[in-house]
Image (spheres, helix red, strand yellow):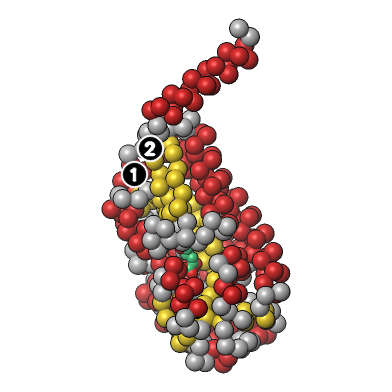
Amino acid sequence: MKLKSVFAAILLVAFFAAAAFGAEYTINAGIGLNDKSAQFQSLKFFKEVVEKNSGGKIEVVLFHSSQLGDDRTMMEALKMGTQEMTCPSTAPMTAFVNAYKIYDLPFLFANEEVADYILDGPVGKKLLDMLPAQGMVGLAYWENGFRMLTNNSHSVKAPEDLKGLKIRTMENPIHLAAFKVMGANPTPMAFGELFSAMQQKVVDGQENPWGTIFLQNYFEVQKFATDTGHVYSPFVLLIGKGFWDGLPDDMKAVVQDAADQAKIHNRELNRKMNAEYLEKLKEKMEVTILTPEQKAAFQEACQPIYDQFAKDIGEDLIKEVQQFISEYKK
Ligand code: KDG
């Protein structure tokens, strides 16, 4: 038998053996966004790398569109060991680790590059290190992105235009306070309930990155959009601590490496998609692109939030982040 055929035979035997015995570990991974999102595409990338590099020992099963529940429910499930993986926005993570509120400060990051610098630096790591005490392990920061406002009443060009608008926010006290101080009437809600809430006019508007606004078809129920970019939303790829502790070291290394590779893929894809979907949305909604002066008015309106939450978040942590941000600018 030729060498090539021997190899093919070995591979075939290995394949059938894996199929017969099944994977040793199963990671059930769920998210709120749908299967067209950059987040789901990145999870598919993660799955391929893990399954290949673990030699089939780990199987990753993917769920989207809140099939396993909302961000908060899935984090609870990780803690209880009934689900292995999720990838929430950091905003609802503040219910478990208060320090994550740092990322909710309005207009903290000027662009994606400074966000990467902070998230991949010592502050980002310090916050990931707080998760095991809560029964979760943070593998990597992926990206949700800068959040933009939509509504179904009128075009918003200044904070005053927010007056009376009922806006859905994530379940996070800083997001609520920021929209209040800008003049809106905010209400927290799980992501999975948002589309029908807008359709049934329970809320007038919401805020999410361009990719989500397009891919979740929000333009069908929202006429107006504004590029407020009021906060940058990171995602954290989370794995349950109980499950993680049960993995042998070589499999932990495979999962960590796949999470890091998928992070790079995710950030590139997300940025590309957000830019593309903004252009597509311009054909479907009235999109306002703010001038720097108009944007500054929103930033100024949100300024009191920094004082309001200084003690809660920790003045030292805020100073530390601001110090790193100013270093980055130099
Ligand atoms: O998959 C992520 C979603 O569950 C959620 O985090 C999306 O930004 C989001 C929101 O507005 O809830």
Q: Is mark 1 within 8 Å of ligand 1?
A: no
The residue positioned 62% from the left and 11% from the top of the image is 3
The residue positioned 59% from the left and 65% from the top of the image is 215
Q: Residues within 10 Å of mark 1 (few under 14, many from 20)?
A: many
Residue 201 horizontal/vertical position (percent): 48, 83
The residue wearing badge 1 is 243
Using the numbered discs, state the Cα–Cα distance from disc 2 to disc 1 in whole angstroms: 9 Å
Mark 2: which secondary structure? strand
Q: Residues within 10 Å of mark 2 (few under 14, many from 20)?
A: some
Of residues 28 and 99, the one drawn nearer to the viewer in this rendering: 28
Position of 2 with respect to 320 (left or right) is right
The residue positioned 71% from the left and 69% from the top of the image is 279
Of residues 13 and 236, the one drawn nearer to the viewer in this rendering: 13
Furthest residue toward left: 80
| Vertical relation: 164 (above or below) 151 | below
Residue 320 horizontal/vertical position (percent): 48, 66
Residue 93 horizontal/vertical position (percent): 39, 64
Residue 67's label in the rendered image is none
Residue 52 horizontal/vertical position (percent): 52, 34
| Vertical relation: 65 (above or below) 263 | below
| Vertical relation: 50 (above or below) 283 | above
The residue wearing badge 2 is 25
Mark 1: which secondary structure? helix
Which corner quadrant of the image does residue 211 belong to? bottom right
The residue positioned 49% from the left and 52% from the top of the image is 140
Q: Is mark 2 within 8 Å of ligand 1?
A: no
Position of 111 with respect to 168 (left or right) is right
For marks 2 and 1 on the same chain, the one whose residue lies earlier in the sequence? 2
